[in-house]
Image (cartoon, coloured by chain):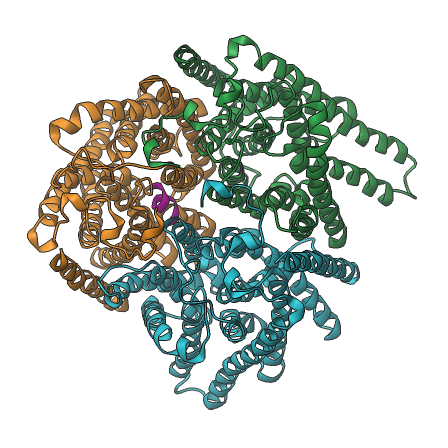
Chain colours: A green, B cyan, C orange
Amino acid sequence: MPSKYRNFRNNVPWLILFLEAVFIVLFFFSTGDASSSSISYPVFQDVNHMVIFGFGFFLTFLKRYGFSSTGFNLLIIVLGVQCSVLIEGLLAFLLQSENEDGLKRITKATVSMTAVAISTGAVLGKTNPMQLILMTVVEIMFFRMSRWINNMFLQVPDNISLMHVHLFGAYFSLAVSSRFSEPSPSSKKNASTSKSDLFSMLGTLFLWVFWPSFNSVLVVDNKTKAICNTYFALAVSAVTAFMLSVLTTKDGKFRMTHIHSAVLAGGITVTYTAHSIEYPWIAMILGLLSSVIAVLGSYCLERCLTPALKIHDTSGVHFTFGLPAVLGALAHVVLLVIRDWTNSPRLGYLVMIRIGAFCLTISVALVAGFITGLILNLKLFKTIPVSKYFEDQFYWEFPHLAVGF
Amino acid sequence: MPSKYRNFRNNVPWLILFLEAVFIVLFFFSTGDASSSSISYPVFQDVNHMVIFGFGFFLTFLKRYGFSSTGFNLLIIVLGVQCSVLIEGLLAFLLQSENEDGLKRITKATVSMTAVAISTGAVLGKTNPMQLILMTVVEIMFFRMSRWINNMFLQVPDNISLMHVHLFGAYFSLAVSSRFSEPSPSSKKNASTSKSDLFSMLGTLFLWVFWPSFNSVLVVDNKTKAICNTYFALAVSAVTAFMLSVLTTKDGKFRMTHIHSAVLAGGITVTYTAHSIEYPWIAMILGLLSSVIAVLGSYCLERCLTPALKIHDTSGVHFTFGLPAVLGALAHVVLLVIRDWTNSPRLGYLVMIRIGAFCLTISVALVAGFITGLILNLKLFKTIPVSKYFEDQFYWEFPHLAVGF
Amino acid sequence: MPSKYRNFRNNVPWLILFLEAVFIVLFFFSTGDASSSSISYPVFQDVNHMVIFGFGFFLTFLKRYGFSSTGFNLLIIVLGVQCSVLIEGLLAFLLQSENEDGLKRITKATVSMTAVAISTGAVLGKTNPMQLILMTVVEIMFFRMSRWINNMFLQVPDNISLMHVHLFGAYFSLAVSSRFSEPSPSSKKNASTSKSDLFSMLGTLFLWVFWPSFNSVLVVDNKTKAICNTYFALAVSAVTAFMLSVLTTKDGKFRMTHIHSAVLAGGITVTYTAHSIEYPWIAMILGLLSSVIAVLGSYCLERCLTPALKIHDTSGVHFTFGLPAVLGALAHVVLLVIRDWTNSPRLGYLVMIRIGAFCLTISVALVAGFITGLILNLKLFKTIPVSKYFEDQFYWEFPHLAVGF
């Protein structure tokens, strides 16, 4: 173990330094106007708050992993945002497209980073910081590539393809996670305490309150409609989460993990459609279905899929973000069909394009995740032993150890 | 106890499902324009944050009731907002009045829900979720009725009558709470730990910071004045809370419950008058008086009223919200008299109307609360035994039980 | 000890009452227009949130001092804001200068209070509330005096001199702290637990997210530029903090205190220059340097300066706020020299003026702090014994004592 530590120390800081130096050099050559912005600052602030604070505390449910959950989340988000802003600038330069203003670039980069924040959830406690950093950089690149393909070949507008972020983040991380060993089922560290669950509830409520900002941040017209629809979808999925939790647990009690995942499902499901849904009741039904899929998904996946595929998903990313996002994609297509049923000869073509875009995102995510998972498990990256999973003390100084957690 | 549980499981989810289905069907028939809004989104966000996050954590002071405090708060707020939006739509249809836009409706509904969030405090730990949900629906209806009477017969404008929300919430819940058994005085669960008090402080500071948004959300003119006056009233009541806490405790120390309740008193007292107070010093004096009434109220009520009337008020709703709101009502009338002393022949009439409006709100709250309390204690609703009061484990799965709280 | 308590009780409430009465009387004579404002409410709200909630929880890292950290922070901030608003009004009256609107005054007062919130950190756990209140009032007066001298004799604009707040707060508190006894090195109370560190992380992330608002609140032109530059500086300093923490700790792990202090350093360093930096890479290099200076500063100061000068600095104010602010001052001058190298004959004069302004602020802070420290240690103020340092129970009722912390 001492040699492990020495290696950890030998690698992580130099990797961070190398990345940061590269970023600063590239920023030196990048241009960008920061004098004004088309994004309102309070809305950027909301999204920034969600990603840094909301996701940071959303992931603190493990009893011995609070420092790493909040700390590493901050580290990879700020690295990823810089990386994402640079890639965007490079693409704008290569494609000779219009340059966006500084705040808008940061906002879009922050929205992209949701994918990484989600992915962290599936491998939470099983990766060391070096693996997390590499995963972040690779994921951001693949996500940009997937968006670029969507944009070039399927004419998906940039703002829509950015909203595939939940879908990409969830399936990328499932594929990555399939390459990591499962924790031993008897591990006592892979559990929560009531205090850690309360911290996680704090993060969840934060995300819940700010979700309408997330879904409306890049919407130009119909901003208010996007806000109202997201609110109603979230409201109904919160209500449904409580209902289903009682029905699916053994002695009819509420289960905290159901609440954590299912209350957000509605917001994720209406991501693609919030600005175009005409009536609140449609958003409400989507919220209800998303919560159903999240709670039943958690029930089924834990029983069937996970043992079969041997994919261990620490924070339930598959049913919290993956399935609701798939439902949202379906809803997007169905609503398009209903709206344009009579008056569009190109309906079939449009439907094919949309379905193609979603399938493409999922495929790129799965393939990229699988490759990333293989790379991260190279000996070079000092995979941590299963016995050290979910353990803050492996990474952080604990002078207060004697005091107890 | 097993049969109790089975009953709990048999009822709660179906009640939630029934309500949610009714809401979705009614939303199908309701109309509402969501394309733009007269409410600024950041201000709605603040109020939403207060109700979901602020009140959720404000109520986490009980040592074994953190999950229920934050979780059930979310559940009843989202149910109540939907219910309130529908009632508003129904009334607009029946009275042929102008239809408000979507975001404004949600904002007003969220403001109304403060009444329910306050009421939860008085019966915290003593009601099961089914009773809470019923109380929410009934309270929202009675509060709308009280506002409608105020509006029809006493010409109180809608925005003012909505601000009676603290008054209504406090006295409604006191009346409800008079129908519930008191916890046994030796109960160790009806207490806080330092960690739970810190979580509650977190909620309190959130509410404190956002209170100016609450008091100015529906103000059209003089928004900035409302903000400044609320800020000064809150500041002085926070200062006074610390002063009085030292003077009223036995060995001259600060008591956390005093701070929790009295720092907010100033904001509640100026609710009716924040936009019309000319000079900050008036707001400051009101803040001082409100804090005095809150701390002395807590001192007297615990000694005299509670034992006499046998009303157990878990989070001190009476002195935290009730008494400061009554003081605010008095201040509203006094300031009116001072301002219009010379130049209004109708002064007497106006004063009578205002006093009438406040008395009406309190009377409706007390009567409605008493009736609701009687209904909630019907055998049908499986009142929980006194020994199970203040206990998360009665409602939530605790796989982490062995780890300790 | 009982007599100590009696004295504590005899003094604190009357001091608070006296101050508050004076404030209300003075507000009675002060004028101010609150009908509209040049400050946007959401941005004021962010700064208010930072000072009340962010700093409150930033300081909760001591294991037995959570109540005092958050509670006393609220108390002194609200007292200080009132005091600061009054001083501003008095000066406007004396100097016959233009009167600012109500919300702008409160915002500027809140920004000033950052100095006090920072100063609290250095003497955290070692001062009683009476000393804290006196320190607040004295510090606010001296800070205003320092700004006035800067303004009168060195033509530093008001908005720039207000941003000297970190510099003033840090060096004032170091001088104050030099007059207090050091805690005994074996004291177990001067430590954190993992839960208290997590609460402190919560405050830190809050401050991190809102720092761009702080740096742009008083900027009139180039607001967006100030926001973007601050964001990049914060991002790079967060990344660097993780890197250096691994390199400087004994067994190559992350240390929480490094993260807490160094992630904010970038935001402090660009305070003076955020609105004028042309390219993000400059802000990023400043962020990197500030984080280096914060972590290395913590390393060196703890080994060399503190034992030599016998200054005990509870929350590391010197390296968290002091050194990054000095670096920011240097950067301000260097950037000025680079920009005006060729085209200004008055460059030498301008540089002298700027350096003079920073030196003046530091000097006033040190002298004022030293005097304040001497006064606070008068017998009159019942300095608390070293054995009672860092102890909530000295000031707060702990009915829940038996339950454990």
- Residue C266 found in image quarter: top left
User: On the picture, is B67 further left or further right than C117?
Assistant: right
The C terminus of chain A sits in image quarter:
top left
- Residue A239 to residue A313: above or below: below
User: Who is closer to the viewer here, C157 or A54?
Assistant: A54
Give x and y (percent) for residue C278.
Answer: 43, 27
Q: Residue C54: where, in percent of width, then height?
A: 38, 44
Q: Number of marks in the image?
A: 0
- Front residue of B353/B28: it is B28
**Location of the N terminus of chain A (image quadrant):** top left
Q: Main secondary structure of the magenta part?
A: helix
Tell me the residue at 47%/16% (across/down).
A19
Viewer-side residue, A307 vs C54: A307
Q: Residue furthest left?
A: C379
Residue B242, located in which quarter of the rendered image?
A: bottom left
Residue at image location 63% in from the left, 34% down from the top: A316
Q: Is residue C53 magenta?
A: yes
Magenta segment boundaries in residue numbering: C52-58
Looking at the image, can residue B45 be seen?
A: no
Q: Magenta segment: does it hold B162?
A: no
The quarter of the picture where residue C366 lies is top left
- Identify whether B168 is placed above or below A5: below
The answer to whether residue C232 shows anywhere in this view is: yes
Q: Is residue A293 above or below residue A64?
A: below
**Of C391 and A43, the residue lying toward us:** C391
Q: Position of residue B53 (x, y in %)?
A: 51, 52
Give the percent coordinates (x, y) of residue C144: 22, 48
| Residue B212 as seen in the image, left or right of residue A288 | left
